[in-house]
Image (cartoon, helix red, strand yellow):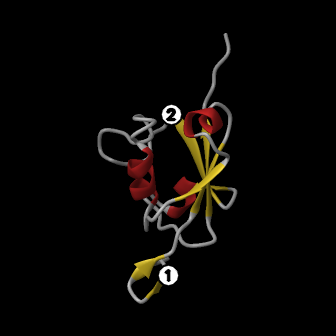
Amino acid sequence: MQPLEVLGCSFLPKIQFVGHLKEVFGSDFIEVKAERLSEALKDLSFKVTDFLDLDGKPSGKYIFLINGADSSLYGDDPYINEGDVVTIVPISHGG
C-alpha cells in the first residue's frame, strides 16, 4: 500500500510509546513525517539508537505495531500513513 499524499506532502502518522519509552520521549504520542516505518524510527534514533538494526530495518529488540497489528505482516519496511498509529513496545525479560 502506497502512502497517501496531498500536494506532494506526506501525512503525519502517530507514534505511541509504551513502558519506559514514554519517559524517554516525554510523551505518550508524537507525530513524525515519514512514509515508511524505518524513516520514522530513524527520526527517533536521537533518543533510542537500537530501533533499527545494522541494515536499517526495524530491529527485533522491540515490537512494532501498526494499528494494532504486527508490522512484519506488512513486509520488512511497511508504508505508514496519516491516521496510522505505530506503537513501539519494548521487549522486557525478567529473570
Q: Residue at x 41, y 89 (%)?
A: 7
Q: In this figure, what is the number of numbered marks? A: 2
Name of the residue lying farthest toward the bottom: 7
What is the quadrant of the C terminus in the image?
top right
- Check disc 1 and give the amino acid type: Leu
Q: CA distance from mark 1 to mark 2?
A: 29 Å
Task: Report x, y in % for residue 60.
Answer: 48, 37
The local crowd at label 2, few if under 14, some if 14 to 19, many if 20 or more residues have their Cα within 10 Å, is some
Q: Residue at x 49, y 60 (%)?
A: 32
- Check disc 2 and give the amino acid type: Lys
Front residue of 33 and 89? 33
Tell which tag, 1 or 2, sits nearer the viewer: 1
Helix, strand or loop under label 2: loop
The residue tagged 2 is 61
Please say if 13 is above or below 89. Answer: below
Q: Is residue 53 left or right of residue 92?
A: left
Earlier along the polypeptide chain: callout 1 or callout 2?
1
Q: Is residue 29 left or right of residue 5?
A: right
Tell me the number on the disc at residue 15.
none
| Label 1 with label 2: CB-CB less than 8 Å | no
Q: Residue at x 56, y 34 (%)?
A: 24
Please say if 20 is above or below 29. Answer: above
Front residue of 78 and 3? 3
Q: Tell me the quarter of the picture where residue 48 sits.
A: top left
The residue tagged 1 is 4
Name of the residue lying farthest toward the left: 55
Task: Report x, y in % for residue 43.
Answer: 40, 51
The local crowd at label 1, few if under 14, some if 14 to 19, many if 20 or more residues have their Cα within 10 Å, is some
Task: Report x, y in % for residue 75.
Answer: 47, 60
Q: Tell me the quarter of the picture where residue 89 sits.
A: top right
Helix, strand or loop under label 1: loop
